[in-house]
Image (cartoon, rainbow, N blue to C red):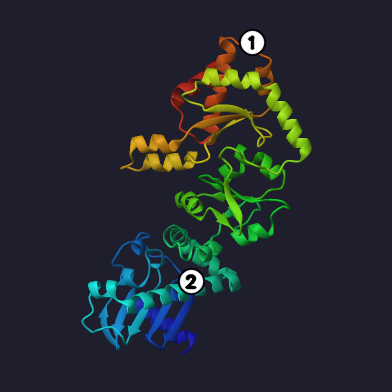
Amino acid sequence: MTKAEYDDFFKSTFREFLPPLDTIHFNVEGTIEFSALLGIPAMPPFDPQEVMRSGSKNIRLYVKRVFISDSFDEDLLPRYLGFVKGVVDSADLPLNVSREILQESRVVRAIRKQLIKRTLDAIKSMAENDADSYKTFWEAFGRNIKLGVLEDEANRPMLAKLLRFESSSGEMTSLDEYVGRKKEGQTGIYYLTADSKATAESSPYVEQLTSKGFEVLYLMEPIDEIAMANLQQFDDMQLVDVTKEDLALGETEEEKQAFEEASKSLEGLCEMMKKVIGEDKVEKVTVSNRLTDTPAVVVASKFGWSANMERIMKAQAMSDPQQAEYMKGRRSLEINPSHPIIKSLAGAADDDATADRIRLLWESALLVGGFELGSPKAFVERIYKQML
């Protein structure tokens, strides 16, 4: 068959406007025999949720060239590959095949395994050899690949290589490309969750990282952070959320010494700030190694939710308030020892005026970090009052 014949078959059979990005046609012979002709669409369905629902009717099953059903998609391909369209013809299944038979059949398990492998191989080949086609694919079905990272543990290493993210380098990048550009001695892949690239670029959490030449990935979709949490590491490098505590930046001995001296000199201020803010709100106040221009930031505990995840879970209609409170974790405040505001607080008297400035700094840090603010209106009113 020619490419034009493949394209015409795909468009007429599945009512597509555009030819497929890639066609996968193969036969398997041996203990189990079947043929498959699959196509990767060039555009997503008009309803983005269509490929996630059961019964999308994208895979048509034949037995000995007799059409059986187009309702067995999930038995032949996992949900995250639901966008793939095609036909499968088996010689080893009975003509009276049912869902119960499919679920228990070793033939179907073998067919499913081959369909997944061939599809992922084709997507990988596209990513490596046809950047323009892969860009089109990623814009249409990138979320499906991220869903695969969550659901398909067996193929997670291959799926990780297909991921693409916005980056502080200025372009979309893969994890392989990130690792290829890492600094000498760098042990982590740094990422930041945000609602837009502009927000990520102006975030105080990346100030020191970018000034030192570290690349940071910007995660801007709700599924991104969950995918990273499931992936955990790539190419022996840990995936590091820059909004969490204990961020290691590979400091020199000189920088470590300066940090220790600053921490020691501001011990009294840190204790006072923790007392003023309240131990029920802040777990600890420490000197920061991640800030250059911002006076303070709020960081999440290492194993708790980030500010982004808190917002996502709070938006869930069926979320459990008790579980949300537990997973939210404790928050810490990190202060910038070289900032004028922190220097002025370090020399200020322990009185009501200083306490008010500390609370204002805490609320500002919550706002900047994207954390929930107790009373935004009251905070704004206090800012206006100080301006007057």
Q: What SS does tag 2 mark?
A: helix
Vertical relation: 250 (above or below) 265: below
299 lies above or below 142: above
Tell me whether circle 2 and circle 1 mark residues in contact (CB < 8 Å): no
User: Is residue 372 shown left or right of residue 267?
Assistant: left
Residue 339 visible, this angle? no
> Which residue reaches farthest left?
96
* C-alpha distance separating marks 2 and 1: 64 Å
Give the crowd class for mark 2: few <14, some 14-19, many >=20 residues within 10 Å.
Answer: some
Up the image or down, 387 lies above or below 161; here it is above
The kind of residue tagged 2 is Leu
The residue beneath circle 2 is 120
Q: Residues within 10 Å of mark 1 (few under 14, many from 20)?
A: few
Which type of secondary structure does the marked residue at label 1 adopt? Answer: loop
The amino acid at mark 1 is Ala
Q: Which residue is drawn at 36% across and 38% down?
A: 323
* Residue depicted at x 60% and y 74%: 129
Q: Which residue is drawn at 44% across and 84% down?
A: 26
Disc with the residue nearer the chain's start (2 vs 1): 2
Using residue 88 as the reference point, say whether residue 328 is left or right of it.
right
Position in image of residue 67 (x %, y %): 27, 83
Tell which of 331 and 39 is nearer to you: 331
Residue at 40 percent of width and 34 percent of height: 325
Q: Position of residue 122 (x, y in %)?
A: 50, 75
The image quarter containing residue 127 is bottom right
Q: Which mark is residue 349?
A: 1
